[in-house]
Image (cartoon, grey):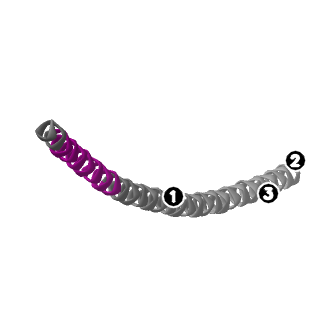
Amino acid sequence: MLMERIESKKQLEAKFQDIYRKIQANRDFTKSETKRVQDTLMAFRSRFEHNLKSLKDEFEEKIRLMREFNREDFKKAEKRLDNLEAAIEQEISDRVTETDQIIGET
């Protein structure tokens, strides 16, 4: 009976050790997977932030170029408008002079 008890105790101890090893292996696997997922997430975050910064820089450059284009276009339009106003003023002046000459002759 004592031998059976000792044998039973040894079997239980062996089962306990086996289960303990499985639990430890599971912990080690969980730790390594956690580290792997964190590293993957960190790489993803880094790539995402880099792409976001690139898009932001590209967008800001396009906005800057559009502003420059619009400013140049406004300058050209203003210069054209000034020329048209000057031409209108000249036309008015010429017609007044011409009308005065015609009236003066009659």
Observer-side mark, 2 or 3, equals: 3
Residue carrying label 3: 18
Q: Secondary structure at mark 2?
A: loop
Q: CA distance from mark 2 to mark 3?
A: 25 Å
- Where the C terminus falls, by quadrant? top left
Magenta residues, start to end: 75-99
Image vertical order of residue 47 relative to residue 93, above or below: below
Q: In the picture, residue 104 is in which quadrant?
A: top left
Which residue is depicted at the point 87% across and 47% down? 1
Residue carrying label 2: 1
Instruction: Tell me the kind of residue under disc 1.
Output: Leu
Instruction: Tell me the kind of residue under disc 2.
Output: Met
How many tags in the picture? 3
- Is disc 1 in contact with disc 2, using a CB cutoff of under 8 Å? no
Task: Give x and y (percent) for residue 58.
Answer: 48, 61
**Main SS type for the magenta part?**
helix
Q: CA distance from mark 1 to mark 2?
A: 79 Å
